Image (spheres, helix red, strand yellow):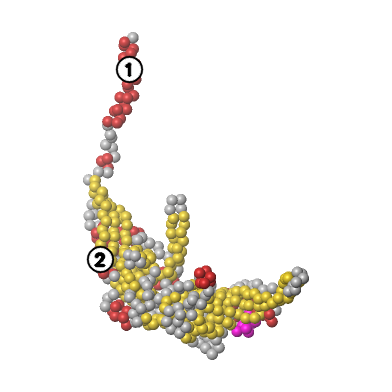
Amino acid sequence: MKIKSLYAAAAALLPFAMLCSCEDNVSPIGGSLVNGEVTITVDTLEMKINATSILEPEFDSRTQTKLLGRINVPQYGSLDCSFVSQLMCATAMNIPDSITVNDVDSMRMVLTVPRGSLTGDSLAPQQLKVYQLTKQLKPEINSSFNPEGYYDPSNPLGVKSYTLSALSMNDSMFQVQKNISIPIMMPKKLAQDVFTAYREKPEIFQWPQTFAQYFPGVYVEQNFGNGCVGVISSMKFYTYWHYIKQVYQKKDDDSGEYHYVPTLMRDSVCLFSSQPEVLSANRVTYKVSDYLKNLANSGKSIITTPGGYYVNLRFPAQELLDKYNKDLYRMAVVSKLTFEIPAEAVENDYGLSAAPHLLLVKSSERESFFKENKIPDGKTSFYAPYNSENKSYSFTGMREYILNIIENGTTVKPEDMEFSLVPVIVSTEDVAGYTSTTTYVTRCAPYIGRPTVTQLDTDHAIICFSFSRQTIE
């Protein structure tokens, strides 16, 4: 019985003995394959970047946003803005058949300026004139477009004196209204001719091309005034008409009875408007001030809008590549590359600010980038918003750019280091995921908005180059 008890005890302790054996002995397999030292290198370098301000007398000014007005700022220069635009027409006139041409009262062109979307003095008295174009606009129109020969200066469609101040609104409208409207009365004959054309020749309005032959567009110029430039977000043409409606209402006497009373009613419809599908361009005459010219000639990096200066620079990719390839016996993985440029608005009397966004694009691809409606790809083009707190532009997504440089060898081609900095307007869209939200750029176009004047401190640019290295033993 004692022998059986010893065997049973030994059998019971066997699993615990096996477990202890597994815990006490760790296999060396695999450890010898990863022996070495992993080093994470983060180089934050303050560098002087070779940069040059380039004065561009002409630029592509085709955009849905329109500028109108004049300003003269000693530190910035003089700016004179007008615009031309084709019109998109409604394919059908939504007016009851009972309405005749004799019921048509008028037509108004309404320009919309978002409140606050101006530069200068909103109380400055101004006057504009609207002309009908007499021939088709050329597709390759730019900022230096000369409208002479495209309209009859002695026959304006409308003239309007205005200011861009909201002070004339009553208290309730001032709090609610987000836009300032500028209505310009058009000739009654134009309204009646358009009405008749819709009724008798509806095929004219089926396509923008056929309508452009009937009505090539409008030219709007600043006729009088100085000291304010407004950003026009929309332009629409409304046709107004009247009709008699039988309104059921209470009699004026004390009988308490109701009866039908013929009442004059008015209504309107928008038939034409400026839309992205049709050609629209700003005519911009910008004379750079001597103050900015002296800054640019002395080596300062100056960027202005609309038009004027942009900046060419040399990005030090070769220096970064040399640092990466310093120890060839190490394995290195690039983690991040960012490029930050200090910047601020040139001090001026009108409170002109810095450009809201900058595009960093290879100089060899600058023109094709906008002609082909590209967006920043993180390889040869990048964008950065202006950080008003840090007073800088930070290009954060340049990792793929340097990876392509590393793959191509130990020497960087000169054209791969030549970049241009251009002011742009960027449209983005946020797409929500399971754990995060991704922002996609949907549009990147030259910035033709408020006048801006930016000075970049390229002598103190900051480059953050981060990569990890492993030494193999």
Instruction: Measuring from the top left, give residue 380's x and y in whole percent.
Output: 36, 64
Q: Quadrant of residue 200?
A: bottom right
Amino acid identity at mark 1: Ala
Q: Which mark is residue 47?
A: 2
The reply to whether the magenta stretch includes residue 225 is no
> In terms of depth relative to the viewer, which is nearer, 354 or 378?
354
Query: Tag count in the figure?
Result: 2
Task: Determine the main secondary structure of the stretch shown in magenta.
Answer: helix
Query: Is 328 or 129 nearer to us in this picture?
Result: 129
Residue 442 or residue 393, whichever sits in front: 393
Residue at the spot x=23%, y=54% of the render? 328
Which of the marked residues, 2 or 1, is nearer the chain's N terminus? 1
Residue 316 place in picture, x, y as percent: 27, 65
The answer to whether any part of residue 363 appears in the image is: no
Q: Nearer the viewer, residue 246 or 110?
A: 246
The answer to whether residue 53 is above or below residue 25 is below
Chain part drawn in magenta: 187-194
Picture disc at residue 9: 1
Q: Position of residue 349 (x, y in %)?
A: 36, 78
